[in-house]
Image: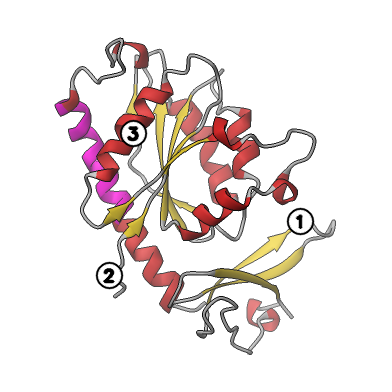
Amino acid sequence: MNDKPLFIPVILGTVRQGRASENVAKFVFEQVKRREGVETEFIDIRELNFKADDAGEQIKDQRFSATCERADGLVLVVPEYNHGYPGMLKHVLDSNLKEYIHKAVGVCGVSAGGFGGVRMIQNLLPVLRELGLVTIFWDGNFSGAQKLFDSDGKILDEATQASRLDKFLGELVWMSKVLRYGRQNISI
Amino acid sequence: MDDKTFRSEQKMICSVCGAQMNHHAMKIDYSLEEEGILEEVHTCPRCGHCELRQAH
């Protein structure tokens, strides 16, 4: 069994000004960093500056693609906009394919209302599947996102949120390990 | 027709570290041709590098 640390980056999936998901993504990133045997990196899709006059693998960002290739799993922190996921996230995700195949992905939904992004997650799942990613069946759900943090972006009830996220990360780490073993050792 | 019909028997060698790669997925790429092209996905057990090649 490969005992190299797992690499599970956290992707903040919105470019919108004033995004509440940024605090959530930073909180999730801190939780992933604390996991033993896991390395991570924070990816803000706003910083990637993908061009908008083409799409798909034609607009690959070499650094982002290399990060996805190195990854064993991904955490997507994504707000729900009009029941869907941000178009810019789809634009960014579509720039890779082989880099994702048979890798684990977990989604943290973020919403201003009370459903924690569940409708967005349902819409995002078939996209992730088509990209070759393997979804876990725990989600992170952050309802009322504006009220979860103080004005400095510090989470107000860290113990509760960390406890909820622990189950999500536990399954994601397990799936990442299993799939890494499978990719490297089991042929179809 | 069975998927195995399309699968290349020749093992792929990692272009990064030279190790023998593991074939773990098939994928139709629709970006190249309207009907799609069947591709094999291989991952290197030594360095984790991933490569695609067209299935035969």
Q: Amino acid at mark 3?
A: Gly
How much space separates mark 2 and mark 3, taking CA atoms? 27 Å
Q: Chain of mark 3?
A: A
Same subunit, labels 2 and 1: the answer reads: no
Q: Tag on residue B30?
A: 1
In terms of sequence position, does the residue under pointer 2 or pointer 3 come before the other? 2
Q: Which mark is residue A3?
A: 2
Q: Residue at x 71, y 51 (%)?
A: A57
- Residue A103 location (% of width, % of height): 46, 57
Measuring from the top left, give residue B1's x and y in whole percent: 71, 77
Same subunit, labels 3 and 1: the answer reads no
Region of the chain picked out in magenta, as a range: A159-173
Q: Give the label, 2 or 3, closer to the camera.
A: 2
Three-letter amino acid code of the residue under disc 1? Tyr
State which quadrant residue B15 falls in.
bottom right
Q: Give the chain letter at badge 2.
A: A
Residue at 53%, 21% in the rendered image: A83
Compared with A66, A51 (above or below) is: above
- Badge 3 element: strand
Q: Who is closer to the viewer here, A40 or B7?
A: A40
The residue sitting at the left extreme is A159
Q: Name which residue lies at 76% across and 66% down.
A: B37
Q: Nearer the viewer, residue A4 or B53?
A: A4
Q: Which residue is mark 3?
A: A140
